[in-house]
Amino acid sequence: MKKKRNLNQGPSAFDEWYEHEFGDRWQLLRASLEKVVVHYSYNENLVKPYYLDFGSVVAANSLPLPADGRILDLCAAPGGKSLVIASRMGSNVSLVSNEFSRDRRSRLLSVLDEHLSPEVRSRLTVTGHDASRWSRYEKESADSILLDAPCSSERHVLNSPVHLEQWTSARIKNLSIRQWALLSSAWLVLKPGGHLLYATCALSRAENDGVVEKLFRKYADAERQIIDFEPYGELSSAVDATEYGYHILPDACNGAGPLYFSLIRKKF
């Protein structure tokens, strides 16, 4: 007997979901996601350029860094955002770049070794822990935290017929649960007065504002921070402001993104 097709799975279900999210904008946004990604050459204080999405540069630049202390990049592979942070941090600052996946961690190590000077590299430590469990072992120990959480990555889905055929909205629900586990753990590790940047390359509110909203509901010491995009010229008027953060979307930002990020300060 032929297996009955799941009507909530595949390309039609995918389009229906995101049409509900973006309305008339979806078809233009979809077309921009299917185009070849144009990577930005980042070379600030690096040994050689690293190519990454410009939205990732903007997001990583938005995290305030301490004059001295410790920074965590909790889901760091492939390493682009760690490089941006490392290129900005002072000589009295250390960075822990964590990646749970062994294969992705190997890639992370290669990127850091190839692009950082020996002096800066000596202040970076690469670890392989489950970031959702980090708060079981440390509390209020990090001055700044970047959490670029695993997400739906719709650009990848759209450009992979196999993944598009397998897509279901259950993936968004499952990922948002994982994202909340990561974010809530990271919050407990952040020092009072410190900053946390939550980021994804997802489109859906459930993985973006929806996750951050839980933080604000649970923790009274969470304070949203406004980001100034004026240094980025035309991009400043193209970034979508959301309830809790910002969304860089490729149809409006010359191909950059998608990249959602929210900057949150822990009040004293």
Image: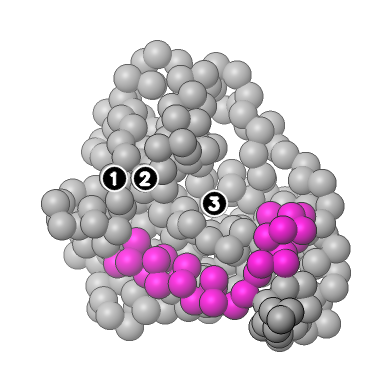
Residue 64 position in % (x across, y down): 40, 48
The answer to whether residue 254 shows anywhere in this view is no
Q: Residue furthest front?
A: 1
In the rendered structure, does residue 178 fall within the stretch colored magenta?
yes
Task: State whether residue 173 is above or below residue 149.
Answer: below
In the rendered structure, does residue 137 fall within the stretch colored magenta?
no
Look at 41% across and 54% down and name the residue there. 147
The answer to whether residue 139 shows anywhere in this view is yes
Looking at the picture, tell me which residue is in the foreground, 216 or 174: 174
Residue 82 position in % (x across, y down): 46, 37
Looking at the picture, tell me which residue is in the foreground, 95 or 67: 95
Instruction: Report the magenta residues as a range.
Output: 155-184
Task: State whether residue 4 is above or below residue 165.
Answer: below
- According to the picture, the residue beneath numbered tag 2 turns out to be 100
Look at 72% across and 67% down and name the residue there. 165
Of marks 3 and 2, the one in the foreground: 2
- According to the picture, the residue beneath numbered tag 1 turns out to be 129
